[in-house]
Image (tube, rainbow, N blue to C red):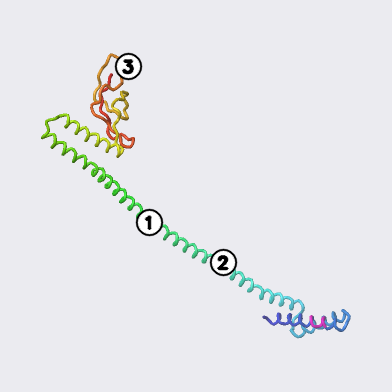
Amino acid sequence: MSYAGLCIRLRRIFNKNWRDFCKRNNKHTTAMDTNNHYQNNESEQTSGFSNEEFNQEAMGAEVSDVTPDAETVEEAEAEEEVNTLESQVESLQQQVEKEKKEYLFLMAEFDNFRKRTLREKSEIIKNAGENVLKGLLPIMDDFERGIKAAETSEDTDVVKEGMTLIYNKLKKYLAMNGVKEIDPNDDIFDTEKHEAISVVPVADEDKKGKILDTVEKGYTINDKVLRHAKVVVAQ
């Protein structure tokens, strides 16, 4: 603090103490004013400054004292704002790193799930094929026995009956696996189920566009066409 500022502060302290003294002793306010004037003159004589010079020096002292404080406050606020922004940036970086790790973990889990699903699907298809073929083996055995019986038997009716039993057994097994015949008695031509291998002209208008004969049966599996029926269509 400068010399002028120190004098101002001492004067204020003295004036405050004098006012308290006057109040305690019930003095008239004029005495306090006179004393203040005396003290002002004494301060001016002691410091060697006039009133105008003293006031200018005091104002300069106050400005010099206040300005560094304002700059310090602004610097402190700026530093605090910078620290806050740095803290937010660090927090966001940590959040990004965390989400990146979670994303990579989910990608790895999804890739493992995809590979596992493909493997299970391949195994299901493979095992389904094995089960179907395994179910055909007893029917194959029946055919072999039927062939041996036909070689030594002279009764054609017995052989025919045996072949019919094997055929019905095979047909039942196919139906159990969802394979069914397309109705051969259906005489309405349907491109979704039938394949026309031949066209025969007819005179009857009612038969035109209808099936005259089924050359090869068609089959469906679970209501989906497995093989189209090959038919002859009237034209």
The residue lying at 74 percent from left, 76 percent from top is 55
Mark 3 / mark 2, whichever is N-terminal = 2
Asked whether 73 or 180 is in front, the reply is 180
Q: Which element carries disc 1, helix, strand or loop?
A: helix
Identify the residue under disc 1: 109
Q: Quick one: 193 or 153, which is closer to the camera? A: 153
Q: Indicate the amino acid at tag 2.
A: Glu
Asked if disc 1 and disc 3 are in contact, CB closer than 8 Å, the reply is: no
Query: Closer to the camera, 224 or 103?
Result: 224
Query: Which structural element holds mark 2?
Result: helix
Q: Quadrant of residue 140?
A: top left
Give the alpha-carbon distance from disc 1 to disc 2, as whole Å.
42 Å
Instruction: Please state which amino acid type lies under the numbered disc 1.
Output: Glu
Quarter of the image where the C terminus is located = top left
Could you tell me how far apart the alpha carbons at marks 1 and 3 are, in whole angstroms? Answer: 64 Å
Q: Which residues are magenta?
A: 16-20
Q: Assess disc 1: are there few (<14), some (14-19) or many (≥20) residues with their C-alpha within 10 Å of its C-alpha.
A: few
Q: Residue furthest top?
A: 203
Q: Which residue is mark 2?
A: 81
The type of residue carrying mark 3 is: Asp
Residue 194 numbered tag: none
Q: Which residue was labeled with disc 3? A: 206
Between disc 1 and disc 3, the foreground one is: 3
**Number of residues whose C-alpha sits closer than 10 Å to that of mark 3, classed few (under 14), some (14–19) or many (20 or more):** few
